Image (cartoon, helix red, strand yellow):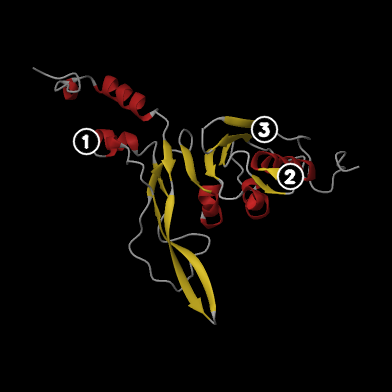
Amino acid sequence: MTSLTEFHLFPTLPSELRLKIWAIVHSSPRIVDINCEKGVVKSNQQQTRFIKAFLSRTPIPPTLHVCRESRYEALSIYKTYFATFKSNYTPHHTTLKAPNYIYVAFGQDTIRCSDNLLEYIDNIELGSIEKMILEVADASYFGHFNMEVVMGMARLKELELNTAEGLLTDWRGDSKAILTRDFEGARINNPGWECPRVRITSRKTGEELKVLDGGALIPGWSPGDPNTFLD
């Protein structure tokens, strides 16, 4: 008896119907976890960290390995990013292994990683990510180290900041308050910035702690224009 997960007559279906089925399969959004293996280069009593390899525990889209037809259709959706042989901090003289990569469809997939990884992600990926979840290591330092990178992510529409809930990190308040002020301050200083929609969530419970609406405070504003928020 054939199980509900098997359909041996699939290859005999009209090609138009098979392609529609592949399209439905490929339309499912994923959360793609990104991690890394770091290396250290020592020179002149200084140490420089770099990315030896971007890693992901997220399974490769299965249709890349089903058959030639499914792979062809999958490759029209999923592209290779996060290549091993390059990152913003890879020394030019460093010898690395053969390039590794991760399949991503930025139009539908959400990238999830630690905020400590942001500075190592190449500009091509930063400029392509539309949805992202950042595991915030320490809210006190997020704005200082990461806000400029986030503001440069031109296609970013949705950002979730997963942080420790309610912990007093410094005199500015808890994690939620600190992150909120970081984003509100960045928008006031650059009211033309198309800020993504920001969700601050609890690492412990998953509860939504705060939502900041996206968009520009002054659409079309450019540096040098009057800024009524600073007057």
- For label 2, the residue is 186
Residue 82 visible in the snapshot: no
Q: Nearer the viewer, residue 128 or 208?
A: 208
User: The residue under label 2 is which amino acid type?
Assistant: Ala
Q: Position of residue 140 (x, y in %)?
A: 66, 50
Residue 144 visible (yes or no): yes
Earlier-in-chain disc, 2 versus 3: 2
What type is the residue that disc 3 sits on? Gly
Closer to the N terminus: mark 1 or mark 2?
Answer: 1
Name the secondary structure under disc 2.
helix
Q: Quadrant of the C terminus?
A: top right
Q: CA distance from mark 2 to mark 3?
A: 12 Å
Q: Check disc 3: other Cα within 10 Å, few if <14, some if 14-19, many if 20+.
A: some
What residue is drawn where x is 39% and y is 39%? 78
Residue pointed to by mark 1: 67
Secondary structure of the residue carrying tag 1 is loop
- Residue that label 3 marks: 214
Point out the frontmost of discs 1 and 2.
2
200 in relation to 116, above or below = above
Q: Position of residue 177 (x, y in %)?
A: 70, 40
Left or right side of 226 for 127:
left
Q: Which mark is residue 43?
A: none
